[in-house]
Image (cartoon, rainbow, N blue to C red):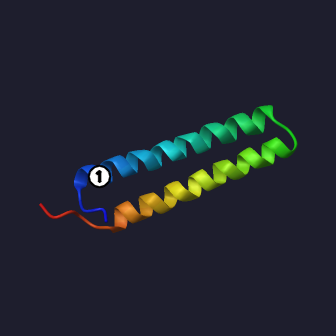
Amino acid sequence: MLGDPLMKMWISFFAMGLMFVSVIVTIVTKEKLRGFIRYLLLSFSFICLMVAGIIIFLVVFSGPVPD
């Protein structure tokens, strides 16, 4: 699945981008919003963080790629 080193790099960049989105959404939500929208966006942020964690886990534990 993750055999190509370049593909692993791009997948890990995508996961880092999800982590960045999660942090920004959390900061903005906690400072600016109230009510239902706040919890909805915090849930979205949590989901982004979980997906990014799973992706990084898969990339790291897929092992080194053959040359």
Quadrant where the image shows the N terminus: bottom left
Residue sticking out furthest to the left? 67
Which corner quadrant of the image does residue 2 belong to? bottom left
Which corner quadrant of the image does residue 56 belong to? bottom left
Quadrant where the image shows the C terminus: bottom left
Q: Which residue is mark 1?
A: 7
The total number of labels drawn is 1
Residue sticking out furthest to the top? 32
Residue sticking out furthest to the right? 35
Q: Position of residue 36 (x, y in %)?
A: 85, 45
Q: Position of residue 30 (x, y in %)?
A: 76, 39
- Left or right for 66, reference 2: left
Label 1 SS: helix
Q: Position of residue 27 (x, y in %)?
A: 68, 37
Vertical position of residue 63 compared to residue 20: above or below: below
Residue drawn at point x = 23 percent, y = 57 percent: 4
Q: Residues within 10 Å of mark 1 (few under 14, many from 20)?
A: few
Amino acid type at image mark 1: Met
- Left or right for 66, reference 62: left
Residue drawn at point x = 53 percent, y = 41 percent: 20
Residue sticking out furthest to the front? 1
Q: Position of residue 66 (x, y in %)?
A: 15, 64
Vertical position of residue 29 compared to residue 15: above or below: above
Vertical position of residue 37 compared to residue 3: above or below: above
Residue drawn at point x = 31 percent, y = 54 percent: 8
